[in-house]
Image: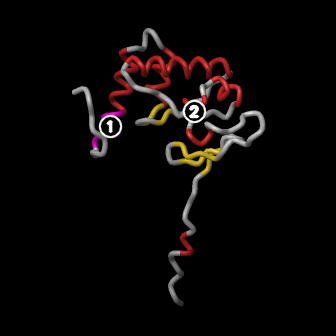
Amino acid sequence: MKVHLFGASSSPGCANYGMKHLANENETDYPSAANFIKKHFYVDDGLTSVETVEEAVILVKEAQALCAKGKLHLHKFLSNNREVLDSIDATERAAEIKDVDLNYSDLPVQRVLGIRWDIESDNFSFRHLNLTLYFSPPDA
């Protein structure tokens, strides 16, 4: 099978399998990118941390090259480091930051894997419902 239609309950699993298979097939040429895809990806979201700007820049380029081997276009990149963002073509960045002036503007809050990520402060948080609005204590 060369194409999978999305929307089926199996779609996330198929996407995950395809990404991991692609990483395994190209591990020799792109060891860091393959490790990133195998260990830090869920379906179509990748989230990782590296020690230096240089490592991040190389990882982005290698991950894109690895995915291109499978005819996949890896894009919508975000980083909490402006130097890393500046190294990524604006067309390859997440839509919310394509038009952000990296020298002056604050970076936005973004959702990643169902978690809120304040890119500027590099903090994660959850949104929750105030259940007291929906449930009242039983009458005494």
The magenta segment is: 10-15
Q: Position of residue 110 (x, y in %)?
A: 59, 45
Residue 75 seen: yes
Q: How many marks?
A: 2
Position of residue 130 in the picture relative to residue 80 (left or right): left
Q: Residue at x 42, y 14 (%)?
A: 27
Which residue, given by chain and number where applicable, does mark 2 sit on?
Answer: 93
Q: What kind of secondary structure does the magenta stretch mostly adopt?
A: helix
Give the residue type that dot 2 points to.
Arg
Crowding near the residue tagged with mark 1, few <14, some 14–19, many ≥20 C-alpha atoms within 10 Å: few
Q: Position of residue 107 (x, y in %)?
A: 69, 41
Query: SS for tag 2?
Result: loop
Which residue, given by chain and number where applicable, does mark 1 sit on?
Answer: 13
Crowding near the residue tagged with mark 2, few <14, some 14–19, many ≥20 C-alpha atoms within 10 Å: some
Query: SS for tag 1?
Result: helix
Position of residue 108 in the picture relative to residue 38 (left or right): right
Q: Residue furthest left?
A: 1
Residue 32, label in figure = none
Quarter of the picture containing the N terminus is top left
Nearer-the-camera pick, 62 or 27 = 62
Magenta span includes 6: no
Q: Nearer the viewer, mark 2 or mark 1?
A: 2
Position of residue 46 in the picture relative to residue 103 (left or right): left
Vertical comparison of 56 with 110: above or below: above
Give the residue type that dot 1 points to.
Gly
Q: Are marks 2 and 1 in contact (CB under 8 Å)?
A: no
Which tag, 2 or 1, sits closer to the chain's start? 1
Nearer-the-camera pick, 25 or 4 = 4
Determine which quarter of the picture holds residue 11: top left
